[in-house]
Image (spheres, helix red, strand yellow):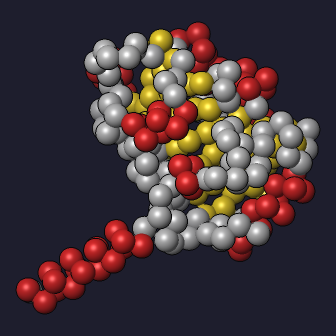
Amino acid sequence: MIFVLVVGAAMELVRSMTRRPSVVVADDLCSPPCWNGITPGATSREEAYSILAATRGVEFGTIFDETRVARTAQFSWFFSPPIPDSTGRVYFADEQVAAILIGTYGSTDISEVIDMLGPPAAQWTHCASSRGREWAQTVLLWPEGGYAVVVDHRSSCPDLGRARVTGGDPVAQVLYFQSSRFPELLRTQSIFGPDSEGALASAQPWPAAGSTR
């Protein structure tokens, strides 16, 4: 038992030492909403594929093209260790990149992201669902900058009013998008959720600096 505990602790130490920061935080090729040289509103479908295929840590064999609701074409892929992020997606409109989604799932937190992007303009809390499960979710919005950050809460949908975002909360997803297409992307309901069409109307201002979040 002691041997198993020691080995487990050693493996965890190795993982922590070799673990890289999130690809969102570590990206030094360009500034948001550009990621890894892919810019919403400027990068073509072919260019995005070439960039992803040449990116270390993107599992080339998992890149696939698919069409979902509202005919929103996208590339999807998985990241490979030691990159801590999970998945990525690039959405297209008129053969150009319209949005980029990185599934961070705890590889970064709210404080780190806000240090990078600045305070959000608004926050939208709604009920998210997947595979028969529902939970409260808050989306921090920077509509003019072209960013959004998703936080999944442990509280259930009936407790939406109790959902609060704190600096230590793990980030579930980071989205970069073409700001001029933001209302259109909300209407597709394929990127920000099935009820996202009303996100801007129901969003609340982000608390001022120094107030409790």
Residue 204 position, x and y percent, is 47, 12
Q: Left or right: where does residue 191 sit relative to residue 94?
A: left
Q: Residue at x 32, y 22 (%)?
A: 213
Q: Residue furthest left?
A: 2
Q: How many marks?
A: 0
In which quadrant of the rendered view does residue 91 lie?
top right
Residue 174 percent coordinates (x, y): 56, 42
Evaluate whether residue 62 shows in this view: no
Return the x and y of residue 190 as percentages of the image width and height. Answer: 67, 36
**Residue 134 versus residue 101 in the image, above or below:** above
Image position of 119 (left or right of 28): left
- Give the residue at x 31% y 15%: 211
Where is residue 121? Give x, y as percent. 54, 18
Q: Residue at x 70, y 47 (%)?
A: 30
Residue placed most toward the observer, 134 or 65 = 65
| Residue name at image x 46 percent, y 44 percent | 172
Quarter occupied by the N terminus: bottom left
Residue 185, can we see it? yes
| Front-most of residues 160 and 90 | 90
Q: Relative to the observer, which residue lies in front, 52 or 133? A: 52
